[in-house]
Image (tube, rainbow, N blue to C red):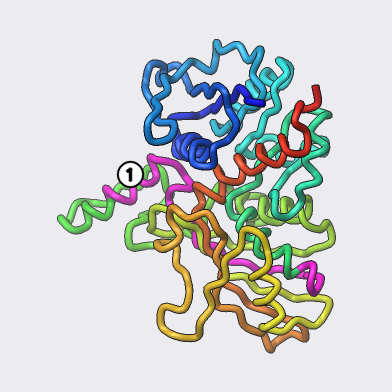
């Protein structure tokens, strides 16, 4: 059975990755439609290595007959068009933050909570979590099963692609400009990003956290366990693709390094590269274009009874966004081939 699939935001970083991954994984689509804003209508985007799709106008597109919508525009755009697609009979997998904390919308990482997909029938919308949350929870799930995590302290090191193409361009232009002594002019970011790091992602909240940090807290509780305590510091780094996270865990049960490595090696979506030697770990530059969540620097934290430190790296455009959305679609059609019709 083939499906009609629409990709919303097809000209953006994540939309292009979704199209590439659908083709790479040979998703059973009879037809794929590329949708974007009116200013992109008529442009062409690649679907796999050989096929080219012409972009259609999201605003006027009729979703009748569409089975699946993989959506990655801005949150305000999803707020308008995701319900419209769902009302037309499609199931929407939305990559924005708009629906994530709605109680009747499942928030899914397929390696972590695949059965939550079954709740899609209420709204016909499934939310894709934040990029940093996704890679963290893929790594934490086997450790939570092993030792029951009570508290997570995480510092993220996030690439500019998480803020879109304009942000990547700003890093490139600032870096080039510094070499020729041009003045630095921040635009997408609040401060210089080239040769710098910025502890500020998304808006500040009343308690001093940023919204990116808040997302990691509330999404972890919704997806993995409502009793886990999470505190996060999210930092933008001067690289193009790949997010890294330094994670400290406090567990309810004893956990040693070897047991942690063994559990992680068996876990779906995880690759362990952990050698106590030069180059015995993975960095963001090495994970770009790769699907797994890489875990390195696994070691006991001696300052708490059942503590563990890990280093987690993933391609934020793939597993942190596009790949996770496609994996949700794959799990959905496996569990519900008729999509609830």
Evaluate whether residue 120 shows in this view.
yes
Number of callouts:
1
Q: Residue at x 60, y 51 (%)?
A: 212
> Can you name the residue that lies furthest to the front here?
1
Q: Is residue 103 above or below residue 283?
A: above
Q: Residue at x 40, y 21 (%)?
A: 40
Using residue 77 as the reference point, say whether residue 109 is left or right of it. Answer: right
Q: Is residue 36 above or below residue 118?
A: above
Q: Residue at x 52, y 37 (%)?
A: 18
Using residue 143 as the reference point, say whether residue 290 is left or right of it. Answer: left
Q: Residue at x 42, y 23 (%)?
A: 53
- 152 drawn magenta: yes
Which quadrant holds the C terminus? top right
- 156 drawn magenta: yes
Evaluate whether residue 159 shows in this view.
no
Magenta stretch in the rendered image: 144-173
Residue 327 lies, in percent from the top left, at: 63, 44
User: Closest to the observer: 126 or 118?
Assistant: 118
Residue that label 1 marks? 169
Using residue 267 as the reference point, say whether residue 160 is left or right of it. Answer: left
Residue 144 lies, in percent from the top left, at: 77, 67
Residue 108 lies, in percent from the top left, at: 72, 45
């Amino acid at each position: 059975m083939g499906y009609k699939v629409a990709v919303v935001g097809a000209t953006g970083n994540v939309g292009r990755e979704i199209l590439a991954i659908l083709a790479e994984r040979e998703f059973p689509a009879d037809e794929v439609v590329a949708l974007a804003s009116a200013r992109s209508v008529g442009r062409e985007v690649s679907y796999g290595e050989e096929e080219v799709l012409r972009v259609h106008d999201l605003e006027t597109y009729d979703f009748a007959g569409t089975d699946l919508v993989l959506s990655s525009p801005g949150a305000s755009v999803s707020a308008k068009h995701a319900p419209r697609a769902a009302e037309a009979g499609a199931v929407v997998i939305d990559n924005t933050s708009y629906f994530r904390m709605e109680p009747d919308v499942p928030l899914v990482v397929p390696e972590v909570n695949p059965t939550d997909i079954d709740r899609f029938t209420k709204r016909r919308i499934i939310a894709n979590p934040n990029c940093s949350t996704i890679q963290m929870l893929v790594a934490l799930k086997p450790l939570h099963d092993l030792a029951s995590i009570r508290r997570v302290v995480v510092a993220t090191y996030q690439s500019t692609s998480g803020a879109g193409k304009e942000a990547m361009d700003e890093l490139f232009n600032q870096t080039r400009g510094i070499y020729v002594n041009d003045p630095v002019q921040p635009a997408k970011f609040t401060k210089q990003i080239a040769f710098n790091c910025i502890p500020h992602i998304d808006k500040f909240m009343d308690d001093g956290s940023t919204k990116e940090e808040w997302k990691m807290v509330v999404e972890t509780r919704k997806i993995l366990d409502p009793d886990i305590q999470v505190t996060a510091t999210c930092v933008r780094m001067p690289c193009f693709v790949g997010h890294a996270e330094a994670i400290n865990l406090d567990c309810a049960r004893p956990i040693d390094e070897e047991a942690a490595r063994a559990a992680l090696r068996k876990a779906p979506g995880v690759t362990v590269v952990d050698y106590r030697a030069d180059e015995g770990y993975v960095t963001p530059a090495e994970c770009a274009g790769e699907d797994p969540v890489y875990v390195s620097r696994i070691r006991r934290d001696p300052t708490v009874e059942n503590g563990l430190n890990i280093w987690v790296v993933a391609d934020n455009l793939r597993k942190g966004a596009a790949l996770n959305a496609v994996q949700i679609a794959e799990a959905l059609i496996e569990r519900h081939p008729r999509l609830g019709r």
